[in-house]
Image: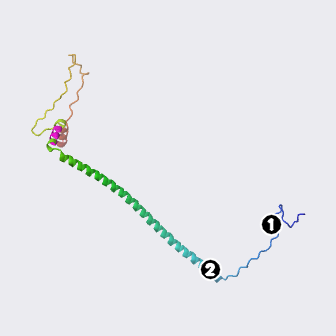
């Protein structure tokens, strides 16, 4: 079989083949009035969809804002509820301690308690009733004198600092301005 020039081969592209005309319908003539009316209808349809779209978007925005506000309120409510629960627990613990202390107070003998307070005040705070004389005794043994009878030179002797001013002297000086 011989290769015909009119038949397509692998070496020749398909374009070389003649085309047949396809039957297309001829567009009908449209008047300017029809074209304007069609354009106006499509514009109105786009505007109507646009207005609806804007309304739908605004409605969705309001709905989302409402949902966000509701969620935030629920979250704040939960936090406040947790705080109230914690405060109630603290209050119940304080009431239980108060009841325990009241029961201990009712059980204790007031005269024994007063004697304990007086003894503590006398021993630890060196306090006494008005008109009483309180003696402060230094129970430590005095330091033993030095073995040598020769006094130390003045440069080696311990320099004693001046006595510190007592608190009541400081207050008196501050109040009187001296």
Where is residue 64? Give x, y as percent. Answer: 47, 65
Q: Residues within 10 Å of mark 1 (few under 14, many from 20)?
A: few
Task: Give the residue drawn at x 59%, y 79%.
Answer: 41
Could you say which quadrant of the image residue 168 lies in? top left
Question: Outermost residue, right direction?
Answer: 2
**Disc assigned to residue 124:** none
Could you say which quadrant of the image residue 77 lies in? bottom left
- Residue 156 placement, left or right of 134: right
| Predominant SS of the magenta segment | helix
Q: Is residue 22 above or below residue 110?
A: below
**Residue 42 within the segment the image draws in magenta:** no
Q: Check if mark 1's residue and mark 2's residue have beta carbons within 8 Å.
A: no
First along the sequence among labels 1 and 2? 1
At numbered mark 1, what does the secondary structure look like: helix, strand or loop? Answer: helix
Q: Is residue 48 above or below residue 15?
A: below
Where is residue 6? Give x, y as percent. Answer: 86, 67
At numbered mark 2, what does the secondary structure look like: helix, strand or loop? Answer: helix
Where is residue 148? Give x, y as percent. Answer: 22, 16
Locate the C terminus by quadrant: top left
Could you say which quadrant of the image residue 14 lies in? bottom right
Q: Is residue 100 above or below residue 16?
A: above
**Disc assigned to residue 15:** 1
Of residue 86 and residue 66, the one placed in the foreground of this image is 86
Q: Which residue is mark 2?
A: 38
- Residue 171 placement, left or right of 83: left
Task: Give the residue drawn at x 50%, y 69%.
Answer: 57
> Does residue 46 appear in this view?
yes
> Does residue 178 appear in this view?
no
Q: Residues within 10 Å of mark 2 (few under 14, many from 20)?
A: few
Segment tinted magenta in the rendering: 113-121
Q: Is residue 134 above or below residue 62?
A: above
Locate the N terminus by quadrant: bottom right
């Amino acid at each position: 079989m011989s290769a015909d020039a009119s038949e397509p081969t692998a070496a020749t592209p398909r374009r070389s083949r003649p085309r047949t005309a396809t039957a297309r319908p001829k567009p009908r003539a449209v008047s300017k009035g029809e074209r304007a009316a069609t354009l106006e209808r499509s514009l109105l349809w786009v505007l109507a969809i646009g207005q609806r779209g804007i309304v739908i978007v605004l409605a969705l925005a309001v709905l989302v804002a409402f949902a966000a506000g509701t969620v935030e309120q629920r979250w704040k409510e939960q936090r406040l509820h947790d705080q109230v629960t914690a405060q109630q627990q603290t209050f119940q613990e304080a009431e239980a301690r108060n009841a325990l202390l009241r029961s201990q107070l009712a059980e204790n003998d007031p005269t024994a308690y007063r004697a304990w307070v007086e003894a503590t005040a006398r021993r630890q705070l060196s306090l006494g009733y008005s008109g009483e004389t309180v003696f402060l005794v230094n129970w430590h043994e005095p330091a033993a004198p030095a073995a040598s009878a020769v006094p130390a030179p003045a440069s080696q002797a311990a320099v004693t600092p001046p006595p510190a001013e007592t608190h009541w002297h400081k207050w008196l000086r501050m109040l009187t301005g001296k």
